[in-house]
């Protein structure tokens, strides 16, 4: 294998130049402030975790984890999400804190990718976890807060789709009883939004025509409150019925939040069916094919760390947000350049300190040749020349 050139970086890694970093920090600050106003406190966890604990518990498939060995031969992973690390903290350092717990975060996460996929192996997420509340109100809070957070980030045109894994589990158990392989294949098609493949797989199964039509009908279960009524009529399975009633209650709470116009029910959306246990949701921004936010209920995770508790949460794909708001540069404070020579150094540095105290950005520059010094620095709102020969300031 040839040695990489000095300017190359690993596939999937990305450099962020000053303007992009400023935008990232702006989005991070605005979203975390929004989450804090809803009562969520920020948490930071290590970049590295033990594979046998957090790595195994993660929703990320094993082949997408970055693994490494420490000097004792123990397998570690770079965190692939924040939910499993937070579950570890909730079950250990916060085990004496009463539920519900509201925690927020902004972190970089790592997932191994195929080289040809064009995806990032390291990216940023900003999100929340609400632990210890199994109510429809908690699920609705996640959706409403996700909407508020996207708006705080500067994303205005988006739609949130909500579903429930329990509905499909119950429906498939009723209509495909004992056909676990077929159930998993159909769920995989829905997870990948492969509706053509879903229909083709249904056609391959030896099913009564009525059953096949009913299973195909779920592809049309997208819309508003009427979808709940249609789903209740489609399946009599107890799990499916309970899931839809829970979703209907979430819908009622979202109406009270005043955000239902930005939400649709999509019962084909199930999230990672091996991880989520209840309501799931995704948010799509206009003109962007990937979801900018995703989340849902995961009531089985914390028991793996010894503190069983219901939990729900979401993560904003902050890196994708940058693509949507990249052109919207924050005005920011005034930028001042102050030039000085040996005799005016103290005066210049004092002036810079005063400007900074007033909230401006002050950059100082020692000048050896005033005639050659460019006073038309385009990156600055003002250029101040403190030339000891004139003891004056020429600004613009």
Image (cartoon, helix red, strand yellow):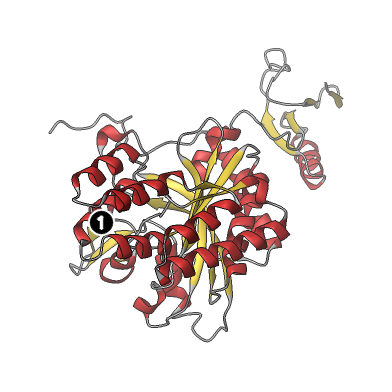
Q: Is residue 302 above or below residue 104?
A: below
x and y percent of residue 172 in the render?
32, 60
Instruction: Say which element carries label 1.
Output: helix
x and y percent of residue 328 in the render?
66, 31
Left or right of 232, for residue 2: left
182 or 27, nearer to the observer = 182
Q: Is residue 259 above or below residue 154?
A: below
Please state, as top left, top right, bottom left or bottom right, where the N terminus lies in the image: top left
Res 365 → quadrant: top right
222 or 230, nearer to the observer = 230
Left or right of 3, for residue 155: right
Residue sticking out furthest to the top:
371
Left or right of 197, for residue 320: right
* Residue beneath the point at 47% across and 66% down: 243
x and y percent of residue 236 in the render?
42, 66
x and y percent of residue 337 in the render?
73, 29
Disc 1: which residue: 184
Circle 1 crowding by C-alpha within 10 Å: few under 14, some 14–19, many from 20: some
Residue sticking out furthest to the left:
1
Res 196 visible: yes
């Amino acid at each position: 294998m040839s040695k990489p050139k000095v300017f190359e970086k690993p596939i999937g890694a990305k450099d962020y130049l000053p303007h992009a970093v400023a935008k990232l920090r702006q989005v991070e600050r605005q979203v975390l402030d929004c989450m804090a106003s809803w009562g969520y406190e920020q948490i930071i966890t290590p970049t590295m975790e033990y594979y046998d604990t957090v790595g195994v518990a993660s929703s990320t498939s094993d082949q997408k984890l970055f693994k490494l060995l420490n000097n004792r031969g123990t397998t570690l992973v770079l965190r692939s999400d924040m939910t499993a690390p937070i579950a570890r903290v909730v079950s250990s350092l916060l085990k004496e804190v009463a539920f519900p717990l509201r925690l927020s975060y902004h972190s970089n996460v790592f997932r191994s990718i195929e080289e040809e996929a064009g995806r990032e192996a390291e990216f940023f997420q900003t999100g929340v976890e609400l632990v210890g509340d199994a109510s429809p109100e908690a699920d609705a809070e996640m959706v409403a807060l996700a909407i508020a957070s996207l708006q705080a980030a500067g994303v205005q045109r988006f739609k949130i789709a909500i579903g429930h894994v329990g509905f499909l589990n119950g429906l498939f158990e009723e209509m495909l009883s004992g056909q676990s392989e077929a159930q998993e294949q159909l769920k995989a098609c829905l997870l990948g939004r492969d509706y053509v493949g879903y229909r083709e797989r249904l056609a391959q199964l030896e099913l009564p025509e009525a059953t096949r039509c009913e299973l195909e009908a779920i592809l049309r279960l997208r819309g508003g409150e009427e979808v709940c009524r249609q789903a209740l009529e489609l399946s009599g399975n107890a799990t499916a019925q309970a899931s839809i009633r829970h979703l209907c209650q979430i819908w009622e709470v979202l109406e009270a939040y005043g955000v239902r116009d930005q939400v649709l029910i999509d019962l084909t959306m199930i999230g990672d069916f091996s991880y989520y246990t209840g309501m799931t949701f995704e948010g799509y921004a206009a003109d962007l094919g990937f979801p900018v936010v995703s989340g849902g209920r995961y009531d089985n995770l914390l028991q793996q760390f010894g503190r069983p508790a219901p939990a729900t949460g979401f993560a904003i794909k902050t890196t994708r947000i940058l693509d949507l708001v990249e052109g919207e540069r924050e005005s920011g404070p005034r930028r001042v350049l102050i030039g000085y020579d040996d005799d005016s150094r103290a005066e210049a540095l004092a002036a810079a300190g005063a400007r900074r105290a007033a909230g401006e950005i002050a950059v100082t520059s020692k000048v050896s040749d005033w005639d050659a010094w460019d006073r038309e620095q385009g990156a600055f709102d003002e250029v101040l020349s403190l030339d000891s020969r004139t003891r004056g300031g020429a600004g613009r």
